[in-house]
Image (cartoon, rainbow, N blue to C red):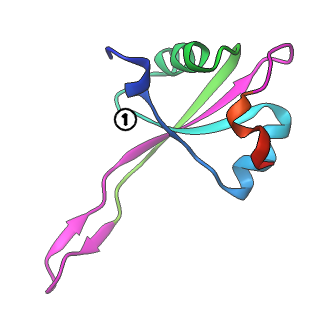
Amino acid sequence: MANVYDIIIRPIITERSMEATGTKKYVFEVAPTAGKVEIKNAVEQIFGVKVAKVNTINYDGKAKRLGAARPGRRKSWKKAYVQLTQDSKTIEFFEGMV
């Protein structure tokens, strides 16, 4: 991928993900074609932190109706759980939300 901002699409802000920020674990929606190494490098470049490990999950788009019984689907997407090292600083974006 050409740009780190193409890899990290948006942070996932839920109650469960905000609880995990206490242990320096953050959740992001990422590009479906991105690998774990690319995600790690993108987070380190964007936020200036050290990443210990990355776990990813692929989600299939749900089947939905589009009008009079026409089938359709939502987009498929990928979620990444990013664990920072113990000596790393926290991500400032999530500071005021906890």
Q: Which residue is the site of mark 1?
A: 32
Q: x, y percentage for residue 61?
A: 34, 57
Q: Is residue 77 in the magenta section?
A: yes
In the rendered structure, the answer to whether residue 29 lies left or right of residue 3 reads: right
Residue nearest the viewer, comparing 21 with 95: 95
Q: Residue furthest front?
A: 96
Tell me what residue is drawn at x 73 percent, y 54 percent: 16
Q: For the N terminus, which image quadrant? A: top left
Q: Is residue 38 above or below residue 19?
A: above
Q: x, y percentage for residue 90?
A: 78, 26
Tell me what residue is drawn at x 56 percent, y 19 percent: 46
Q: x, y percentage for residue 68?
A: 14, 86
In the rendered structure, the answer to whether residue 37 lies left or right of residue 5 reads: right
Tell me what residue is drawn at x 72 percent, y 39 percent: 94
Label 1: element kind: loop
Instruction: Specify the quadrant of the image occupied by residue 95.
Output: top right
Q: Which residues are magenta?
A: 63-90
